[in-house]
Image (cartoon, rainbow, N blue to C red):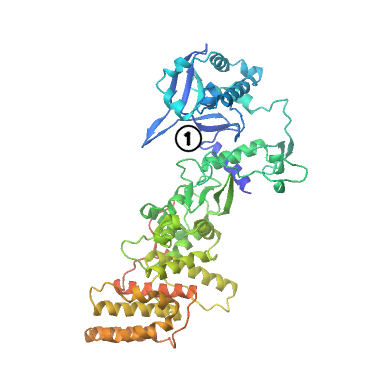
Amino acid sequence: MILQDLTDYYHRKCDDPDLTQRMPPFGLEQKEIPFLLEINAQGELLQLRDTRDTQGKKKVAQSFRVPIGVKRASNVAANLLWDTLEYVLGVDTKGKPQRVAEQHAAFRARLASLPISAQEDAGVQAVTRFLDNIDLALLERQPAWSDALESNALLSFRLEGDLDLVCQRPAVVKAALSIPTDVKVPQAMCLVTGEQAPVERLHASIKGVWGAQPSGASIVSFNRRAFESYGKTERQGENAPVSRAAAFAYTTALNHLLRKGSAQRIKVGDASTVFWAEKQNAFESIFGDIFKDNPDEGVPAVQALLNAVQSGKWGSSDEYTRFYILGLSPNAGRISVRFYHCVTLQEMGLRIAQHFEDLSLTRGPYDPQFPPLFHLLTAIAVQKKADNIPPNLGGAIMNTIFSGVNTPYPSLWLNVAVGRCRAEQDVNYLRAATIKACLNRQIRHAQLASPKLSLDQEFLPMLDINNSNPAYRLGRLFAVLEKIQEEAIPGINATIRDRYYSAASSTPVAVFTTLLRLKNAHLKKLTVGRINSFEKLLGEVLDPITDFPTHFSLPEQGRFALGYYHQRQDFFIKKTSDITPSLTTLSEGTLT
């Protein structure tokens, strides 16, 4: 399914009206070539041209379509008319002269293996003459030589008067796509297309997955006998027969999505997530913005999505257009598929909208309206450092978002959020939003599984005075007691939260009797009006409480934290203001 959908995307992009976004035809690939050997028809070097442009602090090489590169690890294998400086010129850059000689010989052998029709091409003949008489002294006088030598850079050839490279000449491209007659290529039914075709033995490497090897990793590979089909020992690609054309299509499409600067790639935790639609759609361009780390940049995209969900208007797109999301993570020299989802655009919009609805919470003026997932994760990490985010948690949360509106978030997310609140005695906006989202998903899931047994109601974004849950009520009570203390002792450095929050949220019976006695002493320092207001509020909060529980479970500690946060926020906001708009009130932005 994944390979088929990527192959379909490749064919769609081959006809992209934007020429810069078109994918190369079968047998070619886009490659950044930093240096070109420009030669004349006699094979004489005219110049070593530097194709790099300065972008910021880095030099970025120009990208060219070249014959697809060979897959090599430690073996010697040459590309056709482009490769590293050692392969092309036979110049040793790493102190391994014997190996470099083998590499250069392989490069020349690859050129000599071209059919007669290609070898008669003027460009190929010029390259052959150049290789027969390499003038190192002339090369060393080129201004770009030191940079090319230092990095063992990729080189290719251009014939004088041509705009294209020699490897882009029609005769060379045609030869690159042909299978040598002396090579026996097995044929089988392609798992992607269902057609009988030559099987690709080694699929191209996938590059751009964060944490994977820079040289690329495989998504289809076999390196153990246990993974091989009967009778196909050490025959690699034959264990999962994919035709040469299909293997080229899906690897080209995936590398395009993972390319540097791609707007269709985002990183969450250890997962590199790519996304695309079955046809051209505006959602492809805003999906990445929705999950950006910068809240200011993501707000317009989220508002446009929520408005489209609310109104049912998706601009010129079809609401039944399929949308694909693929999560990848590194695994040594291979790539693991973390998750894969294929749903309609309408359903995907609803699922993302529900995620932000679950997170919606009364907030302060500087808290993000739509908190990015990275900020939510760092808020529950030790010392708020990204390095301390639990492994795999980000990918698991993304998988939940895309799986459905009733799918519970990972229990680890709630546990860690509650643990951080208790350890630091701090229930901030991001942690409270996390707790609310996790609890509401659990409640919906339980109601769906056992409608008659589940009595819990989902938590509101703001204070819910009708919620009689004991843990939620005691969280509210703790906030009221802290407020009384703050008004009784203005400017106090440490409140009861700093000393008692952890115990109050986990073993309330051991703490609240003491706190209620302290409350009496604090009330004596307030005016009669404030005393009456607090006594009335305490009566409302404690009304359904018959006894203090001895112990709260982790979900109940989450309810305690949410009750505390809601009550604290209620003290500082105007009762008529709507600080966090719900899904039904968002009307800004359009998805076109």
User: Is 159 positioned to the left or the right of 478 in the image?
Assistant: right
Give percent across and percent down for residue 35. 46, 25
User: Is 562 positioned to the left or the right of 320 in the image?
Assistant: left
Q: Image height check: is 95 above or below 563?
A: above
Residue assigned mark 1: 20
Of residues 363 and 148, the one nearer the viewer is 148
Q: In which quarter of the view is residue 445 placed?
A: bottom right
Q: Image height check: is 577 above or below 64?
A: below
Helix, strand or loop at mark 1: helix
Q: Image height check: is 532 above or below 322?
A: below
User: What residue is rendered at 53% in x and 60% in y?
Assistant: 400
How many C-alpha atoms fall within 10 Å of the one at disc 1: few (<14), some, or many (≥20)?
Answer: few
Kind of residue at badge 1:
Thr
Give percent across and percent down for residue 90. 54, 22
Give percent across and percent down for residue 141. 41, 17
User: Is 242 positioned to the left or the right of 263 in the image?
Assistant: right
Q: In which quarter of the view is residue 462 placed?
A: bottom left
Of residues 279 and 204, the one nearer the viewer is 204
Q: Residue furthest top?
A: 42
Q: Image height check: is 42 above or below 416?
A: above
